[in-house]
Amino acid sequence: MAELRKDLVRDNWVVIANDRALKPSDFPINRNGVNISGNNTFCPFCEGNEAYTTNELSAFRKDNSKPDGPGWTVRTVPNKFSAFQLQGELDMVSTGIYKSCNGIGQHEVVIETPEHGVEFHDFSVDRIILVYRMLKQRYRELAGDSRIKYIQIYKNRGLFAGASLQHSHSQILAFPVVPDQNKGIPKYFNKTGQCLICDILEQEKEKAERVIYESNYFLVLCPYASRFSYESWIVPKRHTEHFSDISDEEIEDLADVIKGFFTAMLASLDDPSYNIMINTAPVNVPYQGGYHWYMEITPRLLIANAAELSSGYYMNPVSPEISAQIIREKMKKIGSRE
Ligand SMILES: [Zn+2]
Ligand SMILES: [Zn+2]
């Protein structure tokens, strides 16, 4: 099992996989260049290869098809190389000044399509709906275990976004501790009694210079202090804390928004690597107001440099106002052609 160690300098946690070790040549970036498992290698996520994954946790299946066999549309399995296991209790250990705990949690892979080579941004709206229904179902299931404190849903597409397999998939990491990343949210709520994300929505709609698109239920925008060029958020207009609060109607609207946004983003940026992250409220902790779930999309056009790693201050060479204008115009252009 993995171990979470407290980084006392940065006041955050690091996950250390202490039961396996990659050799220098196992890393995707080494002296021979860069390498991502692609079309030429065996793919365990393809339909027909179910025996090469761990046993499925959940799947949307055609009638009469059997678990861990073909006939599925979206399939969730535990990550074969998971550093986390949902076993036993949290064991906090102190060694002198250091603090660590065991990796109680779960790492799941949501295989978004049985077909190899069809990418998320090329999915039909119907397939995107299925993927988000599955993510909601898994979130609900994991939130039911009191040992889980935070559920991170994410997607890595392309080598520069950290992907190691080409077959389209999302991942879910359920942690026993709450990451410290978005501490501005409770801080703002404790000071003002207001939801920061609701206040951001209100201010962004006024001037609309960073707004890319607005649908019935969502606002797409480039955030005021974007860390990455063309960083974009898809934010539900209804104040809802957990991603699993999303309704069926909202999932259908979200799928339309995703389709339109990703088509425009991919075309504007010439097929970049990208990450998708869902930020949401912690689970199974004393209630803290002010959380409001949203999706964060970060195209990975630059690699973080030393100044960014050391200070934590990212340097963004494209203003969010220009980023929003470029994607907004592309989205309009593509929309008018359809
Ligand atoms: Zn495949
Ligand atoms: Zn809110």
Image (tube, grey):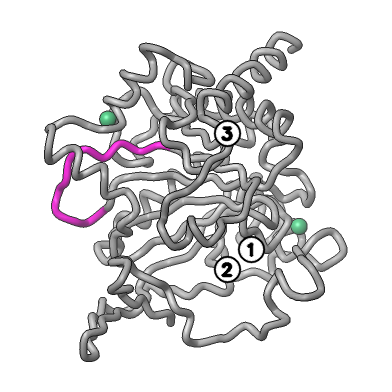
For residue 240, what is the image quadrant?
Answer: top left
**Which residue is farthest front?**
307
Report the residue at 67% width, 26% height from top: 264
Q: Amino acid at mark 3?
A: Val
Q: Is residue 63 above or below residue 89?
A: above
Q: Which-is-in-front pick, marks 2 and 3?
A: 3
Q: Is residue 92 left or right of residue 3?
A: left
Report the residue at 53% width, 41% height from top: 316
Q: Is residue 178 left or right of residue 261?
A: left
Q: Earlier in the sequence, mark 2 or mark 3?
A: 2
Quarter of the figure with the N terminus: bottom left
Q: Is residue 42 left or right of residue 14?
A: right
The residue tagged 3 is 318
The residue tagged 1 is 68
What secondary structure predominates along the stretch shown in magenta?
loop
Is 285 inside the magenta-drawn segment?
yes
Percent across and percent down for residue 143 are 32, 54
